[in-house]
Structures are given as structure tokens and as C-alpha cells.
Amino acid sequence: MVGGGRGAFIGAVHRMAAAIDGQIELVCGAFSSDPQVSLLSGKDLFLPAERCYASYTQMMEEEAKLPLGERMDFVSIVTPNHLHFTPAMLALEHGFHVVCDKPLCLTLDEAIQLREKVRTTGLIFALTHNYTGYPMVKQARHLVSGGALGKIRRVVIEYAQGWLSDDLESTGHKQASWRTDPALAGIAGAMGDIGTHAENLCAYITGLQVASVCADLHTHISGRRLDDDGNVLLRFENDARGILTVSQVAAGEENNLRIKIYGEYGGLEWTQMEPNTLIVRWNDKPTQIYRTGGPGLCAQAEAHTRLPSGHPEGYLEAFANIYRNVAHCIQARLNHETVDEIYLDFPSADDGVRGMAFIEAVVQSYKEKSWIESERSKTKNI
Amino acid sequence: MVGGGRGAFIGAVHRMAAAIDGQIELVCGAFSSDPQVSLLSGKDLFLPAERCYASYTQMMEEEAKLPLGERMDFVSIVTPNHLHFTPAMLALEHGFHVVCDKPLCLTLDEAIQLREKVRTTGLIFALTHNYTGYPMVKQARHLVSGGALGKIRRVVIEYAQGWLSDDLESTGHKQASWRTDPALAGIAGAMGDIGTHAENLCAYITGLQVASVCADLHTHISGRRLDDDGNVLLRFENDARGILTVSQVAAGEENNLRIKIYGEYGGLEWTQMEPNTLIVRWNDKPTQIYRTGGPGLCAQAEAHTRLPSGHPEGYLEAFANIYRNVAHCIQARLNHETVDEIYLDFPSADDGVRGMAFIEAVVQSYKEKSWIESERSKTKNI
Amino acid sequence: MVGGGRGAFIGAVHRMAAAIDGQIELVCGAFSSDPQVSLLSGKDLFLPAERCYASYTQMMEEEAKLPLGERMDFVSIVTPNHLHFTPAMLALEHGFHVVCDKPLCLTLDEAIQLREKVRTTGLIFALTHNYTGYPMVKQARHLVSGGALGKIRRVVIEYAQGWLSDDLESTGHKQASWRTDPALAGIAGAMGDIGTHAENLCAYITGLQVASVCADLHTHISGRRLDDDGNVLLRFENDARGILTVSQVAAGEENNLRIKIYGEYGGLEWTQMEPNTLIVRWNDKPTQIYRTGGPGLCAQAEAHTRLPSGHPEGYLEAFANIYRNVAHCIQARLNHETVDEIYLDFPSADDGVRGMAFIEAVVQSYKEKSWIESERSKTKNI
Amino acid sequence: MVGGGRGAFIGAVHRMAAAIDGQIELVCGAFSSDPQVSLLSGKDLFLPAERCYASYTQMMEEEAKLPLGERMDFVSIVTPNHLHFTPAMLALEHGFHVVCDKPLCLTLDEAIQLREKVRTTGLIFALTHNYTGYPMVKQARHLVSGGALGKIRRVVIEYAQGWLSDDLESTGHKQASWRTDPALAGIAGAMGDIGTHAENLCAYITGLQVASVCADLHTHISGRRLDDDGNVLLRFENDARGILTVSQVAAGEENNLRIKIYGEYGGLEWTQMEPNTLIVRWNDKPTQIYRTGGPGLCAQAEAHTRLPSGHPEGYLEAFANIYRNVAHCIQARLNHETVDEIYLDFPSADDGVRGMAFIEAVVQSYKEKSWIESERSKTKNI
């Protein structure tokens, strides 16, 4: 693990998610840029001192020297955005599979380089757009791809949080500070932090490519250096239209990611804060409610569920689905086996490239007050 | 009543809404451009034949001849959009107060003329943007205007219907036909029909003026002559940002008007399909749910409620609130009394002007693919 | 109208409900036992003084002398419980159809007498168990009677209010006072006031007869003279089991009437506070949501809906469905026509008898701390 | 671990719950009464063969021989009900702390013996009534114990499942088979399996003792040997009243555990299927919604939450709270430290005794068709 030392947020999430299914064991880490903090953080996690590394460079080098079976099988990168690219490249160069937090990196160019490295090394690379791990999101994707809704016409994606309603970064709040610092977070604030989750969710469910965007961004908190609120008009390649709206100053909102997708015959709605429910409304028959673990689900939704219906699975379980799938893929590689197709379902470097292209197009549109065409040649998955 | 003959939709709604409180009696009508249909429609409504007029012109003239107390006190105009302006002008000219269905007319110029006529005659003019009649909408307005949320930063307004998902107008469907016909509906389809409701609701609750818009419109049904789907980026004069998204091809949606308004300290959410609930979320304390008839409401919300909490009041009751308020205002005029301030709360010609300006700005923005400043000099209420 | 003078609650509800559909006009009333109050109340309602009667006896006698067409067509009895029996009998004796508020009267014996009078006179008698007027309740009944759920096994009915959480009756609160006074309300408090609504709703939807009950009643407020809370174990004739729980001291609850009915294949849930939604859950397929005005409804649900789906209809509209149906039945009688079967759907004196039998059984069970068999010979509809 | 071999349900739940927080490692197990299955199950879990025991007796004996630090620190018993008592007694006798699935055992006498053994050994004993692990349940308990609701008057507890709507046990369904077999499950079916969860939840939140019960039980599936549905009238020692209703033939229901508790000033509602929400309704102010991780929570609710609000935590996280607390308590014992009071919060042998007494009283009441007083002398916590 790179990052995730004492006081970090997402590192602990990665560890809990990785632990649930009993397939993954934490064996080493460079938990902090401060070697002492790294060591103490590792001890908190019951690691031996010799595998609490002083830097990720050291970790990659030392672990690579260990024999297969003893050394780490993959590395999780859970640092702020500016520290994704270099350790990810390094890990791939040393032959380690990678699980990387989102967004992929700081620029589209970096993203394309990273994707290229993944392709040439042939290693497994997962990007933790964790919201696609929910069973009901998989069911939504199934309904769309199977044509149940007909041609998709309209998409409404909303991701509202309120935690940045005040100038937290001036109070020394760690999460707020790096997320509003362009050097650490990149060219976008809310749009990069949660807008890319929203974009990814839309792409995962609909399979649609964004053709052009027209965006408005705003910073409501005086002195803040990145956007904390933004709205985007979307046109898709199939001529569907949509809207993506994100905010981190939506006071009172918790983590309200919600998507509605409408086709010719019906529309579906899913909201992350009640993730075990998928609502599908029809023009000509009663609304249907699909439930995690319930009747009528596709195989992929069932395969990502641990409990009988009515036993709520949450954020960690969805996150764990990415880890579990990666673990199965790595296991299959180690055993020279073919992996079950079910486990190939996790966000990849392609998602990372598309996400970075989205951020750049949105920021450009906002600055130029105009519609921006997406650069399909760069972002399309080959 | 002008319009609302056999087979009409909104005319019957007006009649039910006007009847609930026992303050208003239907006394005459020109229910159809076909005199025979007008007569039969009037007989269905237990009216004497002599007050079922062959045309609205005839009705205005004949009724004006009757002595006060016998003649109608006001006229309701419930025809398609292209037949609002002329009968409304005629009614005002004959000294009748007016209740007019929305949108006010076909163009901003007409709207301004009509507002001018209302001002010069001093007559009462109500526009049935009925959604502002709900008690919880009034409570929302109270919370915003009282500053409970702090400065407003963000608005999300959604109005989704699915009933035009198919090419209904080709099947002879009356409602679909006129609403998709530019000669009858005006320059906008969904944006005019329901977008103006959304705009009005936003203005009513927030009191904010739109400074500029950037819009995308689309017609999803081949052959349809007006937009059936549209999305608008909003900038407000106080620097708040927002989004307004409407559709009549959101398959499976019924009449899903929903508004979220966020200020510095909290955000509120109201949805028309569960109108007796107002959700207010706070950064620093538990979410609050206000309920029609429940504790903690402002006087205006209480004054527009008929039943104890938990006895749901719906669309007709909200609509009836406009009629009841108009009735009280007219009654006070007749009695040369001052009307209680409570009853002055209904949409006016000013709302109509602002709505027409909104439609024109949205259509222009869509055509020019650019941001359009609102024409404040024309739309501001004096 | 008998009762419903100034300050009364349910009388105003009856008037609004009767007015909505434009089929019924209020022509006279004995609004209060105080002749002066009756007169003033009638003037508030735009009635001529000569038809504001000093007593219901006078009203029955005087109106009966008027020619058909001029005299009232039916009488609404909206007084407290102890004043249902006598005016209802009198009305029937004078040849007037009756709409009577619930519960039917004070004792099962009275109820049986009244039912007998209804039978012998052949007049129309409606009991305003208004919750059966909701379209989704009719859809629920349709699903059960059509066998969609299979044999019914389990019923859970809950009716919770909180308005009697304090000793309101000691403060002079009119509604609280008579409802907690055995002389005016009868032998049961909450169980009579709202328990009978719950029982009626269950009987309407399921068509099942209660075979025996085991009840617990309680008065939580010191000094109160009737129960304000009660729970009943139910056994039905088809061997289904259930529970009925009511309270008027469920602090914070508004008017929470909720019913769940489970059969072999699925279960349905309806709640009065969101009346336009009917949830049906299945063992083997996704949950279905039926909506007032939406797709997939039975004819009876459709026939009791005024607006397109998504335009919420509430308590008054459901109440109005009883009045509208009664009006059509009376109209048909007057015109010597056969009434459409749709309009025969309203609670009757049979419901009233069954309700009184239920109250008496519950109270007896509570007192004897034992199961009580229902007296089928008395209550069954012939 | 005792039980939880291949094909078992609750064993896997225990393992996931124990793993989340990285405090507990599975070191050995007697996963099945079949030694070969035990071995294979252990290998699935990456255990060495020598710690996959052939029987729980062997496990207790062999592990007790290992030095502290190598041997297991505690044992989880995840077998069917009839196999709780003996292994639990054996574990305690060998000096191991115990986590035991619910209900505690087969009879009240066994339960009392077990509690006595826990007392005399001074070992830690946790019973996995996991629903008390949810943060919002802890907040509910806080509100009641702090007096916010005033004196508690009324409790409604519902636990509805539909999975036994058919005769699954005849199809060889493992879970259905043992749960409907009196030799394995005890004298009650649904009432034992889920009724005790409901009772426990009520006791945890309210702190109230049941004074007497009057129950009806029923078996809807022909040939089934234990109740699959039951309703209980409750009287509490403080004179509150309530109802507990459970079913496993509530077709379409998933795992619908819901509790409502009403006091003098307000009422709260919590439902397990949306566990991160706690609704509190008040007589005199707007409804409040508490949310996991949100503002306004008590320390105990906060201490049992892992993620920021809006990141849903579910069944496994609540279950994990018991394991985490037990782990901290054991850790403190090993380190001779005082444990933080926060971690003392998990169900104990006292809960087990009270649960068994509840089952026995309910069954007796049903058989005798009468109210049964609870045996306080046996069940009260000393």
C-alpha cells in the first residue's frame, strides 16, 4: 500500500474493503512520506517493521527482490491525486499489478502514458471508481445493455455533498486541504473529486460516449482555489442529452450520488445512499423495484452480492467487489488459469483516461463559455 | 369560463379547484369555439342555456350588461396558450378580473402588453402556476426569505414527465396535439409547458432573479415540431448557480417536479409528487421534515391548509388555494374592504412576463449555443 | 346536513368532499343544537335563513313537505357518534337517503336496528369510512379478490395518531372532549374512532371475516375516560392471522393508517399518508409499485381517479368518491335508471353493523382477558 | 470457529464481520461434524491442516494446550441452535472467551446454566444479536435513556420475512430444514429465530422489561413442525403497551425488522433495511432525521461508525461492531488494561437468558390462550 497512514481516510477504506472477503492480506506498505509515520502506521496494522517502508520507491525495489509468494502480489495506491502517476508507473515497471485510487492522475497526458504502460506490461490495473461495484448498478447496466429501456434518450446525474460548505481548508482539515489545492488535486476541485465518479457511473451503466459538453463551474467559498460546484450539459454520441451536476457546497447533503437514465420505454433511478434499491419506471406497466439479493436479477448483480436480500450491503461491500475481482484475476494469473468473466468487471486505465478527458473538457468549456467536443481519438478504448 | 368544454383537461381541474372551498360558483361560460359544444358542455355543468355562450366575445359583452351581483365576478381562461392573450385583454377591457392558465401568452411582447393592461385597469389577475399553492412551497419560501439557509448558492430544479415518449400527436391525442404545435403553444414545447412552472417555482421560493442562461433543447420524437426535453444552466443575480432540467419524454415519469435549494447552512428539497413533505438538511444538525398541517410552520403555510396533518392534500387543494385567494380579493373589492395579506399570495402578470422572458432567453441560448443575459429592464417587477 | 356548524371539523370535510365533483349542492342544514349557531353557520355557507333549521327534527319535517326537486335529496349526518342513530332513523323514516359519519352509532343493537330500517325503506345509506375511497385501496382489493396474492395468510393493520398525547379534553378542545366521553363516543375511544376505520379497511380489501379477537386496551392519560391505545390479535375465518394496532397517543404520528396483507405469493402494503402508491412485493419477481392514475390499474381504481398520475389526489378526493358515488346512485333513482355498477362502491349499513360488532368484541376481550368469537349470525351481510 | 463449514450461511457472515476491522484473524476451526468437510472448509479459508479440527471437543482441547499468543483467543459458535450450549460450556471450561450465535440455546434452563458459567469463569461472552450493532440503534437507545421522548408508552416491533412462504424444508434446503426442526431449533420457529432478535432490539433500545405477554402462533405451511408466524401483545413493567409481530411467511418481505417507540413527547422509528436513518417525530416540532455519521449523534453512535455520512454501512458493519468490541475487550484483558466503556456494548448471556424466557412465555401463552407473566426472578440481570 502506498499512502493510507495514520489520519488518512481512503487508505483505511481500501484496507477494510480488501479484508472483507478473506482473499487479500496486507503485507507491506509505504504509508507516509515521513518514514517514522510509515513505520508507526504499519505497526498499527500488525505489520513487521521491515515491511513498513520509508518510501514507495524503496518498497517497490525491496519487494521486487523477494521471491514470488513472499513479496506483495499487487500494490494499492491511496495517496492524493498528484501521487498516483509516479508510484503507479513505478509499480508497473517493477512488475506489480496496481489498484489505484481515482482520479487516475493530474492530466490527460499522464493518463494516456499510464494506460500505455498498462498495455505494454500486460499487468492488471484497477481504478477504484467504487460506485460501479454495487450490485444494483450492475443490474442497471444489464437493463440498459439488454435493451429493456430501448434507445437511451436522457441522463440526469447528480452528485451532491455539503462538507465543503465552509472554508475547511483554512482550518487545517487534511481532506479539504489537498482536495482544494491545484498542485495536489489537479485542475478541477469538485468536478475532479466527485464529477469523475459521476461520469464513470454514467459511462458504466449506459455505455454511452459523451460527444460534447457545455459547463459552468463556480467557487462559492471565497479564497478557495478550485471549483466546489459545477453543472454540465451533456450530448452523447447516440444523440441522447443529459445533465451532470455536482457540488461540495450543497449544504446538508451527505454523499448524494444519484443517476436517472431514460430510454424509449422506461427510466431507471439509482441512488447511492440507498444502494440496494433500483427503481425502474415504465410507460405502460407498474414501476418495478429491484433489490440487492432479490428476485429477477442478472447474474452479474447476483455474483456481487454476499447476503440474502434485506441484509443491507453498503459502501464497503461495493468497494470490496473491486478488490475481490482483482484478487481473483491475480490469483488466476498466478495459477495460470483462466479467470471467470465475472471477475473482469472493475474500472480500468481506460476509465481513467476517459475521466481525465472529461475533466479537461469541462474546465475548457467553462473557461471558453462554449460547447467543447470530446477528443474521441484519445479517449476511446481500443 | 373560457374554454374547458367536453374533453378538455385543465378546464375540469379549474372547476374542481374553484369548487372545493364553497366560495365560487360557476355561472356562465364560453366552453368551446363550437357554440353547440359550448352549450352541451354548459348543460353538463347544470348551467342555464342562456349563459352558455357561443363565443368568449359574446360572453364578455353580455355579462358586462348584467347588473353587478348577477353578472360573473371574474373569468377563468383555460384555453390553449394561443387563446390566452385576446380573451384576457377583452376581459380586462370589460372590467372583469381574470384567472388565466399558464404560460401567460405566446410572446414576451404580448406579456408586457397584458401586464400593462392589468396595471392600468387595476383589476385582479391571477396566473395558475398552481404549484406555488402548496403549503410546503410556502414554508420553503418562508425559510429562504427568513434567512434560515443563509445566502442561496445553488438551485436544482427538475420537472420530468414521460407522457410524450411516443408520437401521441399523430394519434389525434388532443393534449399532445396542441402542446406540440408552435401556432398554439408558442416557440417552446416542454420548456414552455412545464419549464415555466419550474422557473416560477424557483422564483417563488428563492426570490432570486435569473441573470443568464445557457440552454440545450432537443426533440427526441421524429417529426415533433417543438422541444420535448431541455436542460438549462442558470446563473442568478446573487451569483448563485443552478440547473433546470425538464422533459416530457422521461419515460415512466409521471409529473415529477422537484426542487432543491442550498444555502450556506442548509438545503431544502420539495417534490410535487409527495407535496406534504418538505425536507431541510443542515450541515450541523439533524435533518428536519416539515409536514403540511404539522408543527413548526409559518403562518402562510398554515393559512393554505384545510386538514389536520396526515390527511393528504393534493394537486387540487393547491390549485384551489389560488382560487380561494382570488375569491377573497374579489370579495374584498366588492365589499370595499381591505383584504387580509394572506390572500394576496398568487401568481400575477409579473410572473407571466418573467416566464415569457425565460422561454425566449432559453430558446435564443439554444439556437446561438451561448449564454444569454436576461433582460431585466423588461421583466423586473415594479 | 345535520351538524357541521361553526367550529366543527368533519362537517367542513363533508362539504368540501361533496363539492369537488360539482354534482352536489348544499341546500339546507341543522348545523347545531343551538338554533342561532345553526342560522349563522348556514349564512356562512350562503344558505337562505329559511333553510337553516333549528333542529334536525324540524329539518326532516319541513324538507319532507317540499316538492321533489326543491327539497333536499339526501341528508348528511356529521354529528358526534351519539347523534347518528336518531337523526338517521328519522331521515330514513321521512324518505331521505342518508350519508352518515362513522362509526354508525353507539351499540351493536342500534346498528342492527338501523340496518333493518335501511333494508325496509330501500333507501340509500352510506357510511363515510372514507379510506376505502382511495383508488389504490380499490386496486388492493382487486389484487386480493382476483387471487393475485393467493390465499391470504397474514394481515397487519396499524392506525397511529399522536394528537391525544396530552390531556386535551381538559383544555376544552372540542374534538378531544367528545371523543373521550363515553356518553357521546360510545364504549370505546381510539378503538371506536380509528380502530373501526382500520377494521373497515381490512374487510374492504381482503373480504375476510374476523373469526375471533384477543385484545388489549389502555388509557395512557390519567383521568381519560376511554381507551387511547389498543392492540388486537386477529384470527380470520379462512385461518389467516393478523394484528390490528391503534393509538391516539403515538406521539408525533399524524394520521398513519397502514395496512399490509400477505398471501401465498406476495404481499401488498398501502399507507394513507402516501395514498397514491400501492406496493406489491413478490416472492419470485421484483416489487411492483402501482400509482394512482398510472398503468396497470383495474377499472374501479381508474374510475375513482380525477387526474393524470403524478398529480396527487388526497384525503378530500377519496372522501369525495363516496359522495360522488352516492350522488350517482341517487340521480339514477330520481331518473328511474339503472346505476353503473362502479357507483355502488361505498360503505353501507352492513359495514356499520360489522364495525359495531368489532368494537363490542374488542372491549369484551379486553375486559375478560380472553379470546372472543365474533357473532357471525348478527354481522354477516345478507 | 465452531461450525460455518462449506455451505453454511451464518458462519461466513461471522468471518466477514470479524475481518473488516483488521483486529481479528481466523486461526482454527471445527467447521463441520464431518472431519473431512471441516478440513476442506479450513483449507478454503487458508488455514493449515493441523488447525482444522475434526470436532469442537478436539479443538478446545488442542488449542488449550498451545501457549497464549499462539492459541486462539476466543471461539465463535455458529452452529444451529441445538449446538450452542455444549460447545459454549466447553469453551468456557477451557478458558476461552465466546462469541455465540443466537438464540443462546434450546431452553431457559440451559440459558441460566450458561449464564452462571459465564459469571463464574469471568470470561467474555457475546451473543450476536447483531441488530443492536447499528449506530442508529445506539442513537435510539440514547434518545430513550436520556429521556428525550419522556416516559415510554407504546412499542411496535415487526420482523417480517417471506423466505419460508413455501415448504422449503421438503426440498432439502439446509437453512429451512434445521430452522423448522424442533430438535435443532427448539420449541419455537419464527418466534425463536427472529422473534428473539425483535425482543432483543426492543430491550436494548427501551431498557424496558416485559411484564406479561399474550401470544398467537401459527404454522401456515402444512406439515411444517414449528410456527412460521406469530403475534404477541406486550405489557411492560412501566405500564407501556406494545405489540411484537413476526413472520417468515410474509411473502415478498426480505428482512423487514422495524421498531417504533413512542413516549410522551415523541416517537422514533428505525428499520433495518434502511439502517442508516433514524426518524424521530415530535408532537410540537418538525420531524428529525438522524443519519449514520451525520450531525447531532451521541458518542456511542459515532464510535460505531466507520465512514462519513452518506457512505452506507450495512449488516456486516453492524455485525462487525460486536466483533470489534469483543476484540477490544479481549485485547484489554490480554494487556491487563481497562477497556474503554465504548467497547462494553454487545449482547451478553443476560440477553440470552431473557430471550429464552421470552420464547418460553410466548409458547406457553399461545398454548394456554392466556396472558403469561414473565418470570422476573429468573431473567433479571443481576
Image (cartoon, coloured by chain):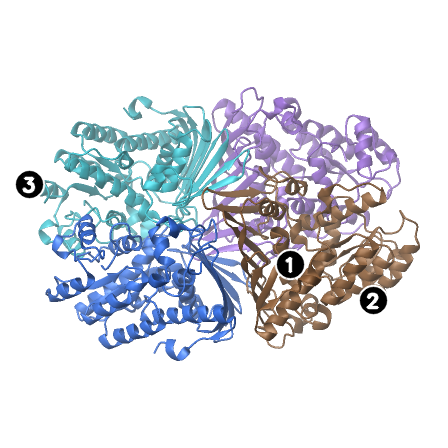
Chain colours: A brown, B blue, C cyan, D purple
Q: Are marks 1 and 3 on the same chain?
A: no
Q: Position of residue A306 (x, y in %)?
A: 67, 41
Quarter of the picture holding the N terminus of chain B: bottom left
Q: Secondary structure at mark 2?
A: loop
Q: Chain of mark 3?
A: C
Say which amino acid is labelled 2: Asp
Disc 1 designates what residue?
A197
* Res. B333 mark: none
Q: Position of residue B195 (x, y in %)?
A: 42, 63
Say which amino acid is labelled 3: Lys
Q: Position of residue B375 (x, y in %)?
A: 42, 77
Disc 3 designates what residue?
C65
Label 3 crowding class (10 Å Cα cut-off): few <14, some 14-19, many 20+?
Answer: few
Frontmost residue, D189 versus B195: B195
Disc 2 designates what residue?
A34
Q: Is residue A110 visible?
A: yes
Q: Are marks 3 and 2 on the same chain?
A: no
- Residue that extends furthest to the front in the rendered view of this protein: B223
Q: Chain of mark 1?
A: A
Frontmost residue, D186 versus A342: A342
Q: Chain of mark 2?
A: A
Q: What residue appears at the point 31 percent right and 39 percent down from the top-left corner?
A: C129
Q: Secondary structure at mark 1?
A: helix
Q: In the rendered view, does A93 fall on the left or right side of A307? A: right
Q: Are marks 1 and 2 on the same chain?
A: yes
Rendered position, D377 above or below C37: above
